[in-house]
């Protein structure tokens, strides 16, 4: 009751969002975090980065959006010496294994994973191999090798998950999208 004796109402305002955990999955940013990518990551509960970050400032920026799981890529030099080259963890009951180059994937890491996240090639790839999802989100950093600019968002609900491929328009250096 309020001090004048009338009942008070408590109003809770919640941000509208889809059910389930949203996982932003990216790789090969090579020192560039595009505005469009940031807008997507702001809607995610967790971020996975498959390596080749190239600048520690990118890590700090990603950590400001959501908890971050990251592996070291072949272009991540001295500043990233303490970063793991492979990583295993679970989100909402879904087990993940991350490595930058799939050629370096360990049998132990892959064997226990529902999802393997990797990068390196800059090419989006999503395929089921023996019941495990192998996902390369491509590159959403500087455009290289005439590849599309891509990342993925996974929604996990229960132990089920769904992956959405996101592709961004190529902008010239200094354009509005960078």
Image (cartoon, grey):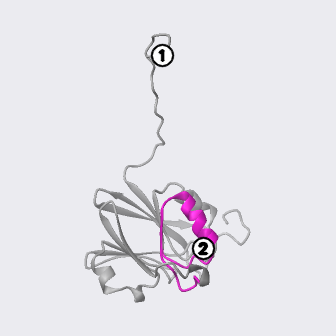
Question: Residue 12: horizontal and vertical position, in percent?
Answer: 46, 33
Question: Residue 164: horizontal and vertical position, in percent?
Answer: 43, 63
Residue underneath mark 2: 141
**Whole-Å distance between the Cαs marked 2 and 1?**
55 Å
Identify which residue is drawn at 67% across, 69% down. Answer: 171
**Front-most of 82 and 15?**
82
Question: Residue 133: horizontal and vertical position, in percent?
Answer: 33, 74
Residue underneath mark 1: 2
- Quick one: label 2, few (<14), some, or many (20+) residues within 10 Å? many
Q: Is residue 41 left or right of residue 132?
A: right
Question: Residue 8: horizontal and vertical position, in percent?
Answer: 45, 19
- Count of labels in the image: 2
Q: Residue furthest left?
A: 130
Identify which residue is drawn at 44% across, 47% down. Answer: 17
Q: Residue furthest top?
A: 4
Is 86 above or below relative to 170? below
Q: Which residues are magenta?
A: 50-77
Question: Disc 2 on helix, strand or loop?
Answer: loop
Identify which residue is drawn at 54% across, 86% down. Answer: 74
- Quick one: label 1, few (<14), some, or many (20+) residues within 10 Å? few
Question: Disc 1 on helix, strand or loop?
Answer: loop
Q: Quadrant of residue 95?
A: bottom left
Identify which residue is drawn at 56% across, 64% down. Answer: 62
In the picture, the disc for residue 134 is none
Q: Residue furthest bottom?
A: 103
Q: Is residue 13 magenta?
A: no
């Amino acid at each position: 009751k309020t001090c004048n004796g009338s009942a008070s109402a408590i109003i809770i305002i919640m941000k509208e969002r889809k059910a389930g955990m949203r996982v932003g999955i990216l790789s090969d940013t090579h020192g560039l975090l595009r505005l469009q990518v940031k807008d997507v990551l702001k809607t995610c509960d967790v971020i996975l980065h498959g390596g080749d970050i190239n600048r520690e400032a990118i890590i700090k920026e990603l950590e400001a959006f959501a908890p971050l799981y990251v592996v070291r890529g072949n272009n991540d030099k001295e500043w990233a010496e303490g970063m793991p080259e492979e990583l295993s963890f679970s989100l909402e009951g879904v087990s993940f294994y991350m490595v930058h180059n799939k050629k370096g994937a360990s049998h132990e890491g892959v064997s226990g994973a529902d999802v393997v996240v990797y990068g390196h090639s800059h090419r989006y790839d999503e395929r089921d191999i023996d019941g495990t999802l192998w996902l390369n989100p491509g590159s959403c950093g500087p455009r290289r090798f005439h590849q599309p600019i891509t990342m993925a968002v996974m929604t996990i609900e229960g132990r089920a998950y769904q992956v959405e491929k996101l592709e961004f328009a190529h902008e010239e250096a200094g354009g509005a999208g960078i």
